[in-house]
Image: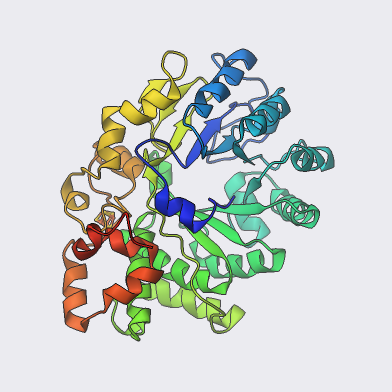
Amino acid sequence: MKHGGGELHRAWPFDEKPLLVFWETTKACMLACKHCRASAILEPLPGELSHEEAMKLLDDLAGFGKPLPILVFTGGDPLMRKDIWQLVARAKELGFRVALAPAVSPLLNDDAIRKMLDYGVDGVSISIDGARPETHDGIRGIPGVFKRSLEVVRKMIDVGLRVQVNTAVMRDNVLELPDMVKMLKDLGVTTWEVFYLIPVGRAQRELDLTPEEWEDVSHFLYEASKYGIVVRTTEGPMFRRVAVVRRLLELNGIEPDTVLETGALYRKLVGRLRELLGEPMGKPLASTTGTRDGKGIIFISHDGIVYPSGFMPYPVGSVRTQSIVSIYRNNVLLKKIRAAEFNGRCGVCEFRDICGGSRARAYILGGDPLGEDPACLYVPGGFSRLLEKYRLDVERAVREIRGLRYVLPVSRSNRDNAC
Ligand code: SF4
């Protein structure tokens, strides 16, 4: 789902309210994806918020005030929750923009799609983790789910639903990214949310990319966004640094690839992209909105425990005992995250405001929720040297590159007034 207009983002009061609330309405799901859990969970887990508690939570969420955050019903599979349509109806009545993140299970049928339209669901996200059936089905552990996912996406777009595709990038599928761009274009998908894998457990470490490779993926995604697809990242905020730098160079008439160091993976991915789609068609649509776990984003689990994001197992409260508004605004860790008070490189980085690193990765891999993001190879200070070396004109560029003003000390005083 799109995050709304650019003007909204620029003015969004991140200290007061999240832009996106992810609510894991249930853990129940008919599927048994490898990376998620070993077996399907057909019944709600003990402790799941009851219908009454869920309705109360919606009222509490409305306490953030207008404009309200976008409410994303996730799971498990939100369609497994028996009162899901009542929750959607109440959320719409309260004025939320509502998105659904359903599993591609037999429940996602024509009836469910019709209900999404009838209830005014504003967006739907579908996960597709590869451009080939073997890849996606292998990652999901379910034969045939790739084909079915494509069918569902086509059907939803045909009936007028706004569909976003989510892709978790890992070693198994990274080389298919260019083919995915073509696939999304063929499907008519215009928003792509790319998840940078956070390896949890030993098995997943083998699927992780190196910092150099994540850097290459970020450069590639920026180029991919020139083909009419809005590209956003989850747990890969360094993408925004790359997007800002590449665009600044372009606006100064410098081809980024002649100046920036990229690796073999980037060249391979971009080479394949050009082979499939030719030269870029338009301006980059790379999102540089400065949200991160706990800043603009909050996650409520099935049992009401609140986390900075769905990838960060660091509880910051419970909606059963506190209001969600109070948790978001007053939790000490969340306040530090929003103030970009980080340790290590992220703490002294010019990009800490619009990037700030993945808090989930810093916590899971380094044990410090405010630590530096080990997937980023950037050495703070490099941007200033780039500005000086190429005498880059930032004052004109700042009008186009939304995130730039949060990077430049010269523009910080103007940040609230700037366009
Ligand atoms: S050092 Fe941290 S804040 Fe800076 S670009 Fe890397 S991840 Fe982002």
Question: Can residue 29 be seen in this snapshot?
Answer: no
Question: Exactly how many numbered labels are in the figure?
Answer: 0
Q: Quadrant of ligand 1?
A: bottom left
Q: Quadrant of the C terminus?
A: bottom left
Q: Residue at x 76, y 54 (%)?
A: 160
Q: Residue at x 51, y 69 (%)?
A: 225
Q: Residue at x 25, y 41 (%)?
A: 366
> On the picture, is 324 further left or further right than 245?
right
**Which is nearer the eye, 205 or 366?**
366
Q: How is the image coloured?
A: rainbow
Residue 148 in percent (x, y) is at 75, 50
Instruction: Please tell me which residue is depicted at 58% across the width and 83% down the height of the picture.
Output: 278
Using the image, determine if residue 199 lies above or below residue 236. Answer: above
**Residue 299 in the image: above or below residue 205:** above
Image quadrant in which you'd find residue 202: top left
Q: Is residue 236 visible?
A: yes
| x then y, percent, for residue 94 | 62, 30
Percent position of residue 302, x then y: 54, 24
Residue 282 lies in quadrant: bottom right
Residue 366 left/right relative to 206:
left
